[in-house]
Amino acid sequence: MKAAILVVLLVAANSISLVATTSQSNSPSAFLDRQPPPVSPEAGREMEARLDEARARYRENPNSADAAIWVGRRLAYPGRFREAIDAYTEAIGKFPQDARLYRHRGHRYITTRQFALAIADLNTAARLTKGKPDEPEPDGQPNARNIPTSTLQFNIWYHLGLAHYLTGNNAKALAAYRQCLKVSNTPDRLVATSHWLYMTLRRLNRSREAAKVLTPVGLQMDIIENRGYYRLLLMYKGSVSPEALRDEALKEASSAGAYSILYGLGNWYLYSKRRNEAIRIFQEMLSGNQWTSFGYIAAEADMKRLK
């Protein structure tokens, strides 16, 4: 309760700055060089050291698309998004048939709110991988078990669905998430795709189809990374209350994972005809600093449409 009150007071105190921030965010250029969410000094030093290593490997292997990709990824982790996009663009000039480059640049176009460019890149990546076997995608920031949980084609369709969702094109988002579900054959991928697929179907007023998405979601799933999405799916099934989930998120209010939960809650309120509660949660989120998280970006997009 105290945490919830504190957040509400923080929103009230920052209402003027929130309006200013929201208005400035209409331009993608505002995000290319924006200060990233804070990390510990130790984490920052490690990111820069890994970036130096990636650059050294690329200098030694200038004809390696893999080495080029890691330069872009290592630039993006500490929030150097303009440089990351430029690195991917340069690499695409050298390796125009490598779907991975379009997938990663598409992701960072989403981060910087350049959704049309993201959609173009991700569609290109989908075309380049059509009919080919999927492949694991190595983690740049490993999870606690050091087990990669995603694949190339999963990430292409997942981010393409998100880009369409953020622009309000729910029909195209649905088509992308249907494709993503076909390569979501682990618990972590399944819950991530199912969460966005469920929300998209609810926004399309296809509640019966949305309910079917929840059928494979059980109480004892072995989730490595996407616990927030998993808890939201359990809430949609009625196994967890919205209040309990909100309390869980507020305990880690400054994390990207908490923003995933808060956005899911706000969106659930929105299509449950509880508009004021949805807006309150979205405002709470936008008063924070996790502007690179998908939950924040989605809340930002929804607030523009709710004006």
Image (cartoon, grey):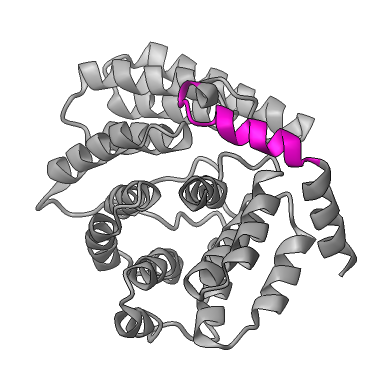
The part of the chain drawn in magenta is 14-29
x and y percent of residue 146 in the render? 55, 54
x and y percent of residue 43 in the render? 71, 34
Q: Residue furthest left?
A: 131
The verdict on residue 25 being magenta is yes
Front in this rendered view, residue 247 or 96 = 247
Q: Left or right? Give the position of 182 relative to 17.
A: left
Quadrant in the picture for the N terminus:
bottom right
Q: What residue do we see at 56% from left, 39% from top?
A: 292
In this rendering, the answer to whether 4 lies above or below 57 is below
Q: What residue do we see at 54% from left, 85% from top?
A: 220
Q: So how many labels did they put on this image?
A: 0
Q: Left or right? Give the position of 133 relative to 244.
A: left
Q: Left or right? Give the position of 236 relative to 70.
A: right
Q: Quadrant of residue 90?
A: top left
**Most common SS among magenta residues:** helix
In this rendering, the answer to whether 250 lies above or below 230 is above
Q: What residue do we see at 35% from left, 31% from top?
A: 105
Q: What residue do we see at 37% from left, 67% from top?
A: 203
Q: Residue furthest right?
A: 2
Q: Quadrant of residue 225?
A: bottom right
Front in this rendered view, residue 226 or 208 = 208
The verdict on residue 111 being magenta is no
x and y percent of residue 135 in the render? 27, 51
Q: Residue furthest top?
A: 59
x and y percent of residue 91 in the render? 29, 19
